[in-house]
Image: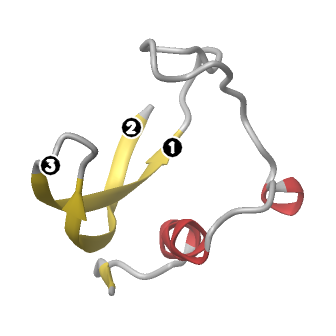
Amino acid sequence: MSVDRLASTSVMRGVVHANGDRAAYLDLCFACSWLSGEAQIGDDESVEVRWWSLDDLPPMTEILRARIDAAISDEQAARFIG
């Protein structure tokens, strides 16, 4: 995989975890190009991984769709998704 550009940024504010910890997260979404290899699980948080065609994506939240839309656009500047 090669990283082509930063596609979008967003901030998730005001998260309170089950243990009481408070956090804010900065999300950076990169547009990348596949070069070779197969998709594979790289950690113990995932149970399945695969490639999807854009026409066959599963249902997802609005923010995830916004990240994909930013990544597949021809724009060079990153979008701020808020």
Which residue is depicted at the point 45% across and 31% down? 1
- Residue type at mark 3? Gly
Observer-side mark, 1 or 3, equals: 3
- Could you tell me how far apart the alpha carbons at marks 2 and 1 are, in whole angstroms? 5 Å
**Labelled disc at residue 20:** 3
For residue 39, above or below residue 59: above
- Could you tell me how far apart the alpha carbons at marks 1 and 3 are, in whole angstroms? 39 Å
In-image side of 39 versus 67 (left or right) = right
Which residue is depicted at the point 68% across and 22% down? 48
**Labelled disc at residue 2:** 2
Image quarter hosting the C terminus: bottom left
Q: Looking at the image, tell me whether mark 1 or mark 3 is earlier in sequence order.
A: 3
Q: Pointer 1 and pointer 3: residues touching (CB < 8 Å)?
A: no
Q: Pointer 2 and pointer 1: residues touching (CB < 8 Å)?
A: yes
Which residue is depicted at the point 62% across and 21% down? 39
Q: Residue 56 location in percent, x, y?
A: 88, 55
